[in-house]
Amino acid sequence: MNKSKGYIPRGQFNSDFMKDLPNYLDIIAYAKDPNHELDIQYRGNSVNIYYLGCSLLKLTDKGSVKFNENYFYRPSMSSLRMTDIDRLIKLEDGAISQESKFFMGKSPEFIKPYKAKAYAIKADLTEQRDTMIERLKNAKGESVGQVLEEMKKTMYDWKKALKDARIRTSVIGERVVQHYISLYNKEKEPGSEFVVLDLEYALSEKSLYRIPEDKKTQSGKRQPIIDIVAIEKATGQLYVMELKYGLKSASGDAGVDVHYQDYLNSVGDDSKWRYFLKDINILYQREKQDGVLSEVCLKQEKPVFVFVLKPTKATDVEEFAKIVAKKCNADIPIINLPLEKDYENPTRQSHHLLLER
């Protein structure tokens, strides 16, 4: 199933995590309530809770609860971007930055005061994070939900602040669309043909279905990430899905041809897909054990590749199909989600995964 003893498939937990699990039950129970718009994803030896496409919390063994301190950052605090702050902290004293556009080629004397400011900002953010996590750990009953709602607001305000500062073009993006797809394609969700099993499935270098070095296509020569792993309710067929937000995402370093080739070289390879399915079975059984799944079966067959398009213009659907046909040279299914003018208030139906027959 894997190449190394250090490899832990998704949905598999060690004894330390299982000992800590009772401490997380109130948090998990709150996150499972569909009214709270939180999405639980099982990882290897951890549970991630997502909100608006970002990791809100990570629950691991040894009582570790992780919440990103950067969510407290607001561009109004400094002219520095959060990426600059992190890079300045990692930069050795007297060194010249080669990563940040703002500091590239600048002298150590120019960088020094900014580095000191970066340390001060990071310390403040870390203190706010630690206080929030401690409050969550000590919370009981209804107060657990109150702290989690504060965390959600902190994250949303962070995303909105980045948009207002024009660091990001929108609060909404591919990850948010993906988040609502996961929320609104559950086993008991009427109108949906699929149940989402996993999001952002990162292929491990230690797995037997990884892409070999000479066939890697992703920038930085890393293993690919499958956007959505889902099961068709009626048949139990496993699908791996790549989500594209608008027509611009169809081309480039992460274009449709790149994703399809990665599929052929990994989980779609005839000599590898069974290893992938073994890992997926562990995740599937975990979700059955926890009551997330009860009726949907999992067919032991090669996963099917499909694109999911969230159009941003009326012409995207037709143009996207042409690009897929030309670049992939294959008959690949496409799930077209509806075009929405007001995506600040998304609907359940607009995120249902439906295959065109």
Image (cartoon, rainbow, N blue to C red):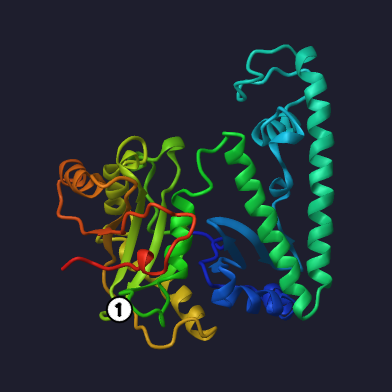
Q: Residue at x 66, y 21 (%)?
A: 97
What is the x, y in percent for residue 223? 43, 47
Residue placed most toward the observer, 306 or 213? 306
Using the image, determine if residue 166 lies above or below residue 192: above
What is the x, y in percent for residue 301? 26, 73
Residue 21, can we see it? no
Q: Residue at x 26, y 46 (%)?
A: 316
Disc 1 secondary structure class:
loop
Q: Which residue is mark 1?
A: 236
Quadrant in the rendering for residue 140: bottom right
Whether residue 225 sits left or right of residue 232 in the image: it is right
Using the image, determine if residue 219 lies above or below residue 92: below
- Number of residues whose C-alpha sits closer than 10 Å to that of mark 1, classed few (under 14), some (14–19) or many (20 or more): some
Q: Residue at x 41, y 49 (%)?
A: 224
Q: How many marks?
A: 1
Going by the picture, which residue comes out furthest to the front?
Answer: 342
* Amino acid on which disc 1 is placed: Gly
Using the image, determine if residue 189 lies above or below residue 154: below
Whether residue 40 sits left or right of residue 351 in the image: it is right
Residue placed most toward the observer, 12 or 243? 243
Quadrant in the rendering for residue 186: bottom left
Using the image, determine if residue 328 lies above or below residue 134: above
Residue placed most toward the observer, 290 or 349? 349
Quadrant in the rendering for residue 38: bottom right
Going by the picture, which residue comes out furthest to the bottom?
Answer: 295
Can you say which quadrant of the picture contains the N terminus? bottom left
Residue 258, can we see it? yes
Q: Residue at x 49, y 79 (%)?
A: 287
What is the x, y in percent for residue 310? 34, 53
